[in-house]
Amino acid sequence: MNSIEREQKKRQLKRRMIEPGKPPAQAGRRESHGETEEEIVRRAERHSRIRRLRLVLIFVFVIVAAVCGVLFYKQNHQYTQYTVSWEKEIPSGESSFTRYVKFGENLLKYSRDGATYLDRSGNAVWSISYQMKSPVCSVNGSYAAIGDQQGNAIYICDETGCQGEATTLLPILRVSVSAHGVTAALVEDSTASYVTFFKQDGSELDWAIKTVLSGNGYLMDVSLSPEGTQVMLSDLYLSDGVLKNRIVFYNFSEYGKSYPDRLVGGFEELGDSICPRVRFLDETHACAFSDSQLLFFSLENVTSPELTAQVAVEGEIQGVAWSPEYVAVVTDHAQGEYDSLLSVYKADGSLAFAAGFTYAWQQLDIEGDFILLYDDRSCRIYSTSGKERFAGEFDFTVSHITRGGRFNTLIVTGADRMRELVLK
């Protein structure tokens, strides 16, 4: 019995012995049935990181979905009604002629006897008084120039007030202002047309452009680039007894010094069309509006303007509008299902959309991504993708409509009141 017990104890000792390079038998059993404590800790940390990552991804997804939902709503929701958020009385003044124009983020009201800068709450920021028979206004960025058509006075203003008064020797036909206050006045006498230039304080610059009626033509319109160094003109002239129109560009920066008379480009692709209006859209894009076509220009190279697109317009042009990004044209469409056709082009001349409509509108404007058509009692709004966003009537008289401070608000001015409308 003793020998048997001794053999059993030997076998137990052998099972408990630790061989070199191997863990104890108990540790081995722990590994075979699970993990070490270190591995358990690592696995717990990994699971915790995964949970945190999932929470972050879910949060980001919710935020992105919410932003996309808001953007989709802002760009596609069709408003069917409105409420008046606030209204404020505006002194009408003595003149029966009153116009409103978007000026910076607010509005400029001008008439024959003065101008007032109104903020988005209808409060007067500043006012100036003058006497004009036929005031015309040009706005570019934070500067505005108000000139007396067929008169001689020009008032140059920014958002803080009148910065200068310029006087021309000849009657004014057109005025154009840059975003830095440089102002151009198109004037004429019986033999020639001239463009004279003024600084923001009203003092005259030593720049000058002259065309003789019997020679190189009659100037119809002028436009200054935002920087104020590039000038675009529409020039009407006779060629072999036929009336022609060309678009010319001048550059009064350092780049234009080496060009005769600062003339850097001329285009005669208009054919028989007459172009009464030219406009810089921004510093590198410009558009000429003729009676049958649109010409889009690129000025990436300031000394070599390029005609990027020539768009034929079918039907009679009833109105045009422009912004730094878009150009809108309304033409008659009597033979189609609708009375009118709204065509909107990007700054490079490519078509953004075209939509037919039947509506007796009076004014056409572009406000951000809104194309506004309105008369004195109603309004239609299209997005820049061609979707109709609003069509409604007002129970008050409308003079001007512009975008409000929020994406779904309009600032509507009438004869004696300003209102903020919230579209719903």
Image: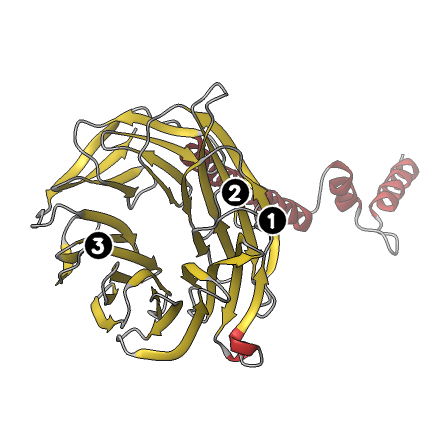
Image point 60% across, 44% down: which residue? 44
- Amino acid on which disc 1 is placed: Ala
Q: Which mark is residue 345?
A: 2
Q: Choose mark 3 or mark 2, whichever is in front.
A: 3
Q: Choose mark 1 or mark 3, whichever is in front.
A: 3
Seen from this angle, which residue lies furthest front?
241
Q: Is residue 179 above or below residue 203?
A: above
Element type at marker 2?
A: strand
Q: Choose mark 2 or mark 1, whichever is in front.
A: 1
Label 1 to label 3, Cα distance in Å?
35 Å
Q: Which residue is mark 1?
A: 309
Whether residues under marks 3 and 2 lie with C-beta atoms below 8 angstroms apart, the answer is: no
Which one is nearer the viewer's eye here, 84 or 192?
A: 192
Q: Position of residue 194 (x, y in %)?
A: 39, 69
**Badge 1, how many Cα within 10 Å: few under 14, some, many 20+?**
some
- Amino acid on which disc 3 is placed: Ser
Element type at marker 3?
A: loop
